[in-house]
């Protein structure tokens, strides 16, 4: 032991103390297990990140679709309002024309009545 030479339980010559060699081997095995677990963790996190990126992409696409639909609805609402205003203007125009035609009809009936009276008087006196 003083010279740095050791014998293990199989009586093989060792340069390192067998206890230290065992601890070193255990540490090596634990490190190997830790690295394997770390690699597994890295693989899992990579898969998780890919899934999250995919979901983020899908969410972004749905968000853009929703914005497009919202803009379409707003556009349709404005278009409907514009059509409504046009129809109200047309209705007002037709109402004014109807009123003008009623007045004209009333005037023509009055003229016709007057002419009929003149005809009746002319035929009565003839």
Image: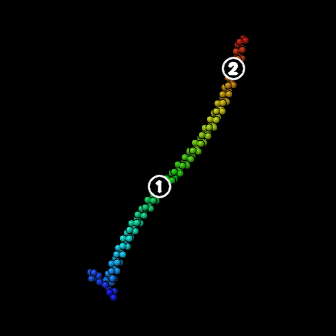
Decide: few, some or many residues near mark 2? Use Cα within 10 Å; few <14, some 14-19, many ≥20. Answer: few
Looking at the picture, how far across and down is residue 21, in whole percent? Answer: 33, 79
Q: What element carries label 2?
A: helix
User: Of the residues under marks 2 and 1, which one precedes in the sequence?
Assistant: 1
In front of the other: 32 or 57: 32
Extreme residue toward the bottom, this view: 3
Asked whether the beta carbons under mark 2 and mark 1 sit within 8 Å of each other, the answer is no
Looking at the picture, how far across and down is residue 100, in whole percent? Answer: 67, 30
Q: Identify the image quadrant of the N terminus.
A: bottom left
In front of the other: 18 or 109: 18
Q: Identify the image quadrant of the C terminus.
A: top right
Above or below 61: residue 2:
below
Q: Which residue is drawn at 37% across and 69% down?
A: 36
Identify the mark at residue 58; answer none if there is no mark: 1
Q: Image quarter for residue 16?
A: bottom left
Q: Residue at x 59, y 42 (%)?
A: 81
**Residue at the disc numbered 2:** 113
Q: Is mark 1 on a helix, strand or loop?
A: helix
Q: Residue at x 53, y 51 (%)?
A: 67
Looking at the picture, how far across and down is residue 79, in whole percent? Answer: 58, 43
Cα–Cα gap, marks 2 and 1: 80 Å
Instruction: Please name the colour scheme applied to the rendered image.
Output: rainbow
Tell whether 122 sits left or right of 13: right
Decide: few, some or many residues near mark 1? Use Cα within 10 Å; few <14, some 14-19, many ≥20. Answer: few
Q: Residue at x 42, y 64 (%)?
A: 45
Q: Image quarter for residue 20?
A: bottom left
């Amino acid at each position: 032991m003083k010279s740095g030479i050791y014998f293990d339980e199989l009586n093989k010559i060792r340069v390192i103390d067998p206890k230290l060699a065992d601890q070193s081997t255990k540490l090596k095995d634990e490190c190997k297990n830790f690295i394997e677990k770390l690699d597994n963790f890295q693989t899992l996190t990579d898969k998780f990140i890919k899934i999250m990126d995919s979901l983020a992409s899908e969410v972004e696409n749905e968000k853009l679709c929703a914005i497009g639909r919202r803009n379409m609805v707003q556009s349709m609402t404005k278009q409907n309002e514009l059509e409504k205003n046009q129809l109200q203007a047309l209705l007002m125009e037709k109402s004014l024309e109807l009123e003008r035609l009623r007045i004209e009809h009333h005037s023509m009936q009055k003229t016709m009545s007057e002419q009929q009276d003149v005809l009746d008087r002319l035929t009565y006196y003839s």
